[in-house]
Image: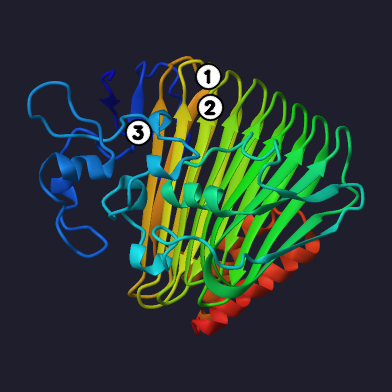
């Protein structure tokens, strides 16, 4: 394994972008250290609150690699690009809660998505909107399925092996969808279930696809997205589940030559929602924008773990996620991985995450990771901030006669509106703005 040099983030407190064109040949910025014994760092951080089993059995249970010499500490894969991918569930060990990918997730609240057979009734899928878009329900033996996305974790692999039918949405080549494609995913059962959705934007097509999740469900979901050469695709994933819902979703996209891809996540409802969106560049000249908005109430767990994989030269990416939290034990997690591979010369990338804590008792974890394997890039950087209301902002508004309660709502509304406006679907933007207002009212803010 090649040596990895740790360097501190070259970003200012306000998130100013940094040019890393002359940086080391390979560097990881802000990533968790891979040179310490993970067992010591997160001792006892398991589903049952137990210590990691000793010896090689405990090591193998975590899927870590052993050093080839001596009795040195065992470390996980040093590069995000080394992450295991497989359709075979047996390739992913049972989860313990010690895994880096799962250390923030309360496994007990997954309601069996990581342990049980996913035999429940999956949420119903109905598709409306654009009339010039093809919608099919196909069996799992359809050759298109699995061509764009490969599971990267145990729940995703379990979902792949359990689904029986998939919904395939195709935007034909050189077609501009004559309206938004509205995909309603409505849950009615709490039994653990699996679901598969595929969105195929053929070359030089253009469309907006909205995945609108509601109702009650315990769902392991795979969404695979193909963005053809020269295509322009926006995918919006809205999670407005009932309070008891559990939703774990892998949403992987492959982005072709000169394509434009925008992915927007809005998570408001559900007991536990864990999304892992990814954008993987497969050819040059492509651009990806990834936006996220989440608002967690008391006891709610909202988690986002994303990846931007710059595997080819001259591509551009921008990531902006914003969250608000209120109430006791409200918990949000954001982990942003940007990987610039050795071949990805000319890359231009930046990611940022902002979190606003509205009350005591809430917790936000924010981990930006930037991994660079070539110095021949246009620029790369990241920023992360978590804090309370800016007293100066409140003072400014209140000094102009606005009551404190109204001033606080204005600050939150302005903070989150940036993401809502990226959807570009007026009716949906209005609905989500109203949902944010209800969240604020529920917290008596």
Q: Residue at x 39, y 43 (%)?
A: 90
Question: Who is closer to the viewer here, 168 or 128?
Answer: 168
Of the numbered discs 2 and 3, the one sitting upstream in the chain is 3
Q: In the rendered image, which residue does mark 3 sit on? A: 29
Q: Residues within 10 Å of mark 2 (few under 14, many from 20)?
A: many
Can you tell which mark lies on residue 259? none
**Image location (x, y in percent) of residue 44:** 17, 58
Q: In the rendered image, which residue does mark 1 sit on? A: 344
Foreground mark, 1 or 3?
Answer: 1
Q: How many marks?
A: 3
Q: In the rendered image, which residue does mark 2 sit on? A: 310
The secondary element bearing badge 3 is classed as strand
**Quarter occupied by residue 183:** bottom right
Q: Residues within 10 Å of mark 1 (few under 14, many from 20)?
A: many
The extreme left residue here reads: 70
**Image location (x, y in percent) of residue 227:** 71, 35
The secondary element bearing badge 1 is classed as loop
The secondary element bearing badge 2 is classed as strand
> How much space separates mark 1 and mark 2, taking CA atoms?
6 Å
Of the numbered discs 1 and 2, the one sitting upstream in the chain is 2
The answer to whether the residues at label 1 and label 2 have Cβ atoms under 8 Å apart is yes
Taking 299 as reference, is 194 above or below it? above
Check the picture and name the quadrant holding the N terminus: top left
> How much space separates mark 2 and mark 3, taking CA atoms?
16 Å
Q: Residue at x 10, y 47 (%)?
A: 54
For the question of whether residue 257 can be seen, the reply is yes
Lateral position of residue 404 relative to residue 6, left or right:
right
> How much space separates mark 1 and mark 3, taking CA atoms?
17 Å
């Amino acid at each position: 394994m090649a040596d990895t040099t740790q360097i501190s983030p070259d970003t200012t407190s306000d998130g100013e972008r940094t040019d890393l064109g002359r940086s080391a040949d390979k560097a990881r910025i802000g990533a968790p250290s891979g040179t310490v014994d993970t067992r010591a760092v997160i001792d006892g951080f398991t589903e049952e609150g137990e210590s990691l089993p000793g010896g090689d059995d405990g090591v193998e249970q975590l899927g870590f690699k052993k050093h080839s010499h001596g009795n040195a500490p065992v470390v996980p894969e040093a590069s995000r690009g080394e992450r295991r991918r497989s359709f075979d569930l047996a390739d992913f060990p049972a989860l313990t809660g010690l895994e880096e990918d799962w250390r923030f997730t309360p496994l007990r609240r997954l309601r069996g998505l990581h342990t049980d057979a996913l035999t429940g009734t999956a949420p119903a899928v109905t598709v409306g909107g654009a009339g010039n878009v093809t919608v099919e329900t196909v069996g799992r033996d359809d050759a298109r399925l699995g061509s764009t996305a490969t599971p990267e974790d145990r729940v995703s692999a379990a979902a792949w092996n359990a689904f029986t039918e998939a919904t395939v949405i195709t935007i034909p080549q050189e077609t501009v969808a004559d309206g938004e494609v509205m995909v309603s995913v409505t849950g009615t059962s709490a039994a653990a279930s699996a679901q598969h959705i595929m969105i195929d934007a053929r070359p030089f097509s253009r469309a907006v696809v909205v995945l609108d999740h509601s109702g009650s469900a315990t769902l392991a979901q795979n969404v695979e997205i193909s963005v053809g050469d020269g295509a322009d695709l926006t995918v919006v994933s809205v999670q407005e589940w009932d309070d008891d819902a559990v939703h774990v979703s892998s949403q992987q996209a492959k982005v072709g030559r000169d394509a434009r891809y925008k992915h927007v996540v809005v998570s408001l409802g559900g007991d536990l929602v864990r999304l892992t969106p990814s954008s993987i560049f497969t050819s040059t000249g492509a651009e990806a924008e990834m936006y996220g908005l989440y608002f967690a109430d008391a006891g709610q767990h909202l988690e986002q773990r994303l990846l931007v994989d710059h595997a080819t030269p001259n591509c551009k990416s921008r990531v902006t996620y914003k969250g608000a939290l209120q109430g006791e034990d409200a918990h949000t997690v954001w982990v942003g991985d940007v990987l610039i591979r050795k071949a990805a010369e000319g890359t231009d990338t930046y990611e940022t995450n902002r979190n606003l804590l509205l009350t005591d008792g809430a917790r936000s974890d924010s981990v930006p990771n930037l991994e660079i394997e070539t110095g021949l890039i246009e620029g790369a950087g990241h920023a992360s901030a978590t804090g309370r209301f800016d007293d100066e902002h409140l003072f400014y508004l209140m000094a102009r006669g606005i009551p404190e309660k109204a001033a606080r709502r204005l600050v939150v509304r302005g903070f989150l509106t940036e993401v809502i406006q990226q959807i570009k679907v007026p009716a949906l933007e209005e609905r989500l703005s109203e949902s944010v207002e209800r969240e604020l009212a529920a917290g008596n803010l």
